[in-house]
Structure formats: structure tokens, C-alpha cells
Image: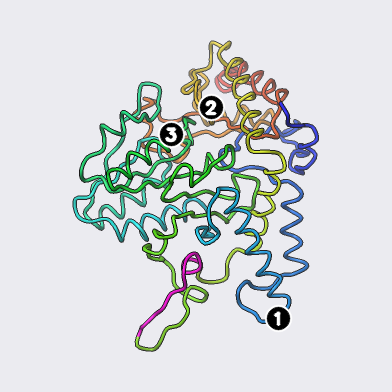
Amino acid sequence: MMINVEEIRKDFPMLKKTMHGHPLVYLDNGATTLKPQCVIDSVVEYLTSYSGNAHRGDYDLSHEVDEQFELSREKIASFINAKKNEVVFTSGSTDSLNMIAYGFGGVVLNEGDEILLSVAEHASNTLPWFSIADEKKAIVNYIDLDESGKITIDNVKKAMNEHTKIISLAHVTNVLGYEVPIKEICELAHAKGAYVIVDGAQSVPHMRVDVKDLDLDFLAFSGHKMCGPTGIGVLYGKYDLLVKMKPLRLGGGSNTRYNSCGVVTLKNPPYKFEAGTPHIEGVVGLGSAVDYLLNIGIDEIREYEKYLRDYCISKMKELDNIEIYNSDSCGAIAFNIKNVFSQDGASLFNTYGIAVRAGQHCAKILDNYLDVTNTLRVSFYFYNTIEEIDKFIEVCKKGDEFLDAFFG
């Protein structure tokens, strides 16, 4: 492993925190990630040193804001191998996916067209499609998962038909953590005249995502899941599709001119989608986060996380009181302590200073597949350690203690 974890951990002030007298063990990185000091400093620097508006003023301070704002756009474009004018700033993956569903789906979908999803999708990649399908009288159908919970190219082929217009899938699913064969899906979809939208919230922070190589039509991801601030995200779209796409919000900054008769001329992408004052400190912080991740190395991050996950799975399999639902995936680990409700299990971990997720994880139609309503979820990032996993495993062994304490 090339990552120097002990040095990296010094960059994260939150790792000095304690809970219930124990050092924080943060294993809920699928929900949000901790922030390194360099990201915090970049946000504070904007707020204290050049806190003007973007794309508004004709003075030096505003020019400095513009430069830093657009520099972040360039960094993010390079990070995913996109063109600068294909990167739209949003409030997060949810915002991006809603913009795509209503702004693009609302333009290209016709009555009887099909939208293909999977039951493993996050609510942000189901609910907007339900709504626009209802509005356009389109049809939502699902690609079957195989026996382990994966999406296979064979099942995509079986699901597609002459009415398929849009396929919208998570690159890595947020509960089962399986990587979808998105490049092959794009090839298949484009050959049939369909578009592919990708929820990259759980992939972009953890692995190399090259939008040109994958030939994605659209990609959505969030800054807070990759060491950036909350409230900032990215919508990538092929430029010709962004031209076709309709903005959902209009206002200052999105138009070049309009008159009292209602004749409006919008700016070119990406600016036609960025009406109003943007989340400037979020954009600056996300640019800093990208620099930080690149300095560590995306491939190194993925390799180290695999090492952590493999180790954790091997230790969990040694325990007879743990049910694992996705031992062979690449992302989060979904599991339960046998005979313990997931939220009760999370409370047990919490008393030992360990933060894990419990519930349905915003994937509320996955329970039919898993045959279980709620699960626990642990998800790693490059600042986690083997020692933290050992602490987690020790609490897994104590699962019955919760029942003893509750009923004793």
C-alpha cells in the first residue's frame, strides 16, 4: 500500500474527536466524508480574503473570485476528463439528477418511452424519474439484479426494447456496493439510440472515472462524499446534450438578454444552468478537495480501500452472529447482527465511538430483493485503518450484549 495513512490522518481535524470516551472511528463515508484541513482553509480563505460575488462585478475583488471559481471548474473537468463547458455546478447529486430528469428527460421523453432503472438505486435516481414518467406518460421498468445483487450486461440486454429511451443507474450502488459495467451499457444503449445517466456519488470519490472513455451522456456526483464541502455537486453532460437540455431555474447569470415581451436568450452551457449567486465557497472547497485527492492518487485510494474491505470481510466471516449481504462487492458492506434490529446495532456501535449507518439507506425498493427491510452499513475511505476495523470487529462480537442490556 503506497498510502501513508498515519500522515494522512493528521490532515483531518475530526479524527481528534471522541464519542462516549472513545476515539472516533468513522465508518459512514458513504453518507459523507470528513474534510481535510486544506479544504477547510480554502473555504475560510474565500470567506476572509476575497469574499465577493462571482461573475457579477467589474472590480479586482470580483475578478479574483471569478478566477478561483473557474479554476475549480477546470480542476473538476480535468479530474473526470471532461471539457470545462461540460461541468455544471449544482447543490449535489440529488440536484444534478433532478435537473437531468426534468431538464433533459422532460425534453426527450415521449408517451410510451421507457426509462430503465434498478431496484438498487438511491431515491435521488428513482423519484425524479417516477415523476417525469408520470408527467410525460413514459414507463419505468427495472433491470433485474442477479443472484448476488449485481447488474449484468446480459440482464441489461434482456430489459431493453425498442421503447427504451433512458437508462439511469448508479456506477457503484450505495447499499450493495457493486460496480456496474457502465462502459458496456453505454455501448449497448447508444447502439439502440438510448441515453445513459450515471449516478457517480459512490464512484467518483473512490476510483478513476473518465467520462470520455466510458462515453457517459450524463454524470452526477457530490462534493461532500469526496472530502469537499456540503451543498456543492457536479452535473457533467456531453455539450450537445446540455445545449438541448432545459434549465429548471432562471434568473441572474443564466441569460444574455431578455425583454418585456418575454423574449429570452440564455447563455451557453454551463452558465445557463447556474442562475443566481452560486455556492462559491463550496466550489472553491471542492477544487481544493480534488487537488488533495489527486495528490494522494486515485488509483492508490482504490487499492487501499480494497485492502481495508477485504480485511474487514475476512474478519466478519469468522463471526457466526453476522449476516453479510454483499461480501464480494467493491463499495460499502451491508450487514446485520443476527436478531438485532439495525438501528439498535448502530446504537451499540455508537457507545464504542464507532459511526456506522443503519436503515434503508435511501434505497427503499431494494428490500424486496434483500428480503430484509433494514441493514447496517459500513463504508471506508483512505483515512481509515486496520486498527479501526479491529475495533469494529470487536463490537460486532458484542452484538448479543445489546439484547442482554435491553432485556436483562
Mark 2 vs mark 3, foreground winner is: 3
What amino acid is labelled 3 in the image? Val
267 is within the stretch colored magenta? yes
Asked if the residue under mark 1 is in contact with the one under mark 3, i.e. CB atoms within 8 Å, the reply is no
Span colored in magenta? 262-274
From the viewer's perspective, tell me whether residue 214 is left or right of residue 27: left
Looking at numbered disc 1 in the image, what kind of residue is underneath it? Answer: Tyr
Image point (55%, 34%), residue name: 357
**Residue with the mark numbered 3:** 180
Is residue 408 rendered magenta in the image?
no
Query: Sequence-wise, which precedes: disc 1 or disc 2?
Result: 1
Label 1 neighbour load within 10 Å: few <14, some 14-19, many 20+: few
The residue tagged 1 is: 59
The residue depicted at 45 percent of the width and 30 percent of the height is: 374
- Asked where in the image residue 50 lies, by quadrant, the reply is bottom right
Between marks 1 and 2 in the image, the one whose residue lies nearer the viewer? 1
Q: Quadrant where the N terminus lies?
A: top right
* Residue 168 x/y as whole percent: 37, 44
- Residue designated by label 2: 333
Position in image of residue 153 (x %, y %): 35, 31
The tag earlier along the polypeptide, 3 or 1, is: 1
Residue 122 in which image quadrant: top left
- Within 10 Å of disc 2 (Cα), the crowding (few <14, some 14-19, many 20+) is many
Tell me if residue 47 comes above or below residue 321 in the rendering: below
Does dot 1 land on a helix, a strand or a loop?
A: loop
Give the residue at x 50% y 64%: 270
Give the CA separation, mark 2 to mark 3. 16 Å
